[in-house]
Image (spheres, grey):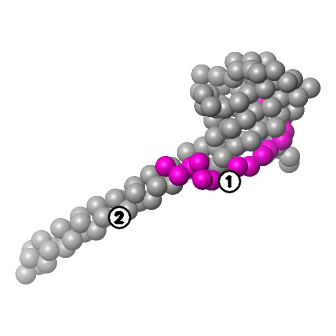
Amino acid sequence: MKKFVLLLIVPVALVLGVQTATAQQKATSSVESNWNSFRTETLSGTITMVQPGAKAVYVEGSGGVSFQFLVTNKTRIEVDGAKATIDDLANQTQKQVTVTFVARPNGDMAHSITVSG
């Protein structure tokens, strides 16, 4: 009898586990596919570090909180009014910056990065 109950419990547990994993995967992919519908936010602060290879820019906002922004090919970068690249940002640490971004589950995506002064 104990073996029979165990044989019934194991398949049920496996099916429930697969259904839960599938539901979580669908929810995550739904959020990721609709990231353009997320609200754009703006942050001003100081550039603390730039990692061109990782396509990442770190900005310290008010209160000393550090934020990481992911840079894509669509990110508009401007330094003192001129178009720039992420490589150009590496020379701009400790300067004031304004970043317009969309918060995403896998990282904040920068839409624009504007360095002034």
Placement of the C terminus among the 4 image quadrants: top right
Tell me where residue 70 sits by quadrant: top right
Is residue 20 something that shows in the picture?
A: yes
Q: Is residue 39 left or right of residue 18?
A: right
- Give residue 67's position: percent from left, percent from top: 72, 42
What secondary structure is marked by label 2? helix
Badge nearest the viewer, 2 or 1: 1
Identify the disc placed on residue 39. 1
Magenta-drawn stretch contains 45: yes
Tag count: 2
Question: Residue at the location (34% across, 59% down)?
Answer: 22
User: On the image, numbered disc 2 is attached to which residue?
Assistant: 20
Is residue 92 something that shows in the picture?
A: no
Q: Is residue 71 left or right of residue 88?
A: left
Q: Is residue 98 left or right of residue 103?
A: right
- Give residue 100's position: percent from left, percent from top: 74, 41
What secondary structure is marked by label 1? loop
Other residues around mark 2 within 10 Å, as few (<14) / some (14–19) / many (≥20): few
Question: Residue at the location (12% across, 71% down)?
Answer: 7
Return the residue nearer the eye: 5 or 39.
Answer: 39
Q: Is residue 76 left or right of residue 44?
A: left
Question: Residue at the location (88% across, 28% down)?
Answer: 116
Q: Is residue 69 above or below residue 93?
A: below
What residue range appears in magenta? Answer: 33-48
Return the residue nearer the eye: 93 or 42.
Answer: 42
Q: Is residue 45 above or below residue 48?
A: below
Give the residue type that dot 2 points to: Thr
Question: Residue at the location (68% across, 38% down)?
Answer: 110
Ranked by sequence position, the earlier of labels 2 and 1 is 2
Magenta-drawn stretch contains 32: no
